[in-house]
Image (spheres, rainbow, N blue to C red):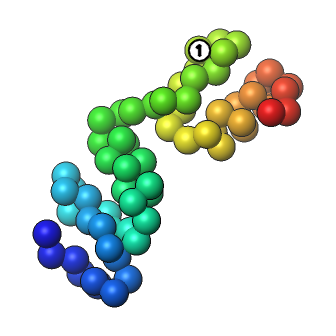
Amino acid sequence: MPRPQAYKYKYVCYLCKTYNTYIMCNLRMHIGSHFNVKPFVCQQCGFRVTRKQGLKYHMKTVHGLNH
């Protein structure tokens, strides 16, 4: 797949072809956004988010817990 700036972006999203990154993990998370993948689940209420930081923020603001 052609990369717009090969020295800057190593990976390109094969679904939208507009997302570019140099870090594979970022690409995986981006691809998950196309399929609404939310792997992090709150054990208190079942709230689901895409990123671990989002779950930490939820736990702090909604449940008052610092994890």
- State which quadrant residue 35 falls in: top left
| Residue 30: image location, x then y, percent | 38, 51
Residue shown at 85%/26% (left/top)?
A: 64
| Residue 17: image location, x then y, percent | 21, 63
- State which quadrant residue 62 falls in: top right
In this image, 25 relative to 48: left or right? left
SS at mark 1 in the image: loop
Q: In the rendered view, would you say 57 is above or below 10?
A: above
Residue shown at 26%/65% (left/top)?
A: 12
- State which quadrant residue 41 falls in: top right
Residue shown at 30%/42% (left/top)?
A: 34
Would you name the residue on which mark 1 appears? 46
Q: In the rendered view, would you say 61 is above or below 25?
A: above
> What amino acid is found at the position of numbered circle 1 in the picture?
Gly
Q: In the rendered view, would you say 63 is above or below 31?
A: above
Q: Give the class, few, some or many, for how many residues have Cα within 10 Å of label 1's Cα (few <14, many ≥20).
A: few
Number of marks drawn: 1
Q: In the rendered view, would you say 43 is above or below 28?
A: above
- Report the front residue among 34 and 24: 24
If the image is split into quadrants, where does the C terminus sit? top right
In this image, 67 relative to 37: left or right? right
If the image is split into quadrants, where does the N terminus sit? bottom left
In this image, 10 relative to 4: left or right? right
| Residue 45: image location, x then y, percent | 65, 12
In this image, 49 relative to 67: left or right? left
| Residue 66: image location, x then y, percent | 85, 33
Residue shown at 29%/84% (left/top)?
A: 5
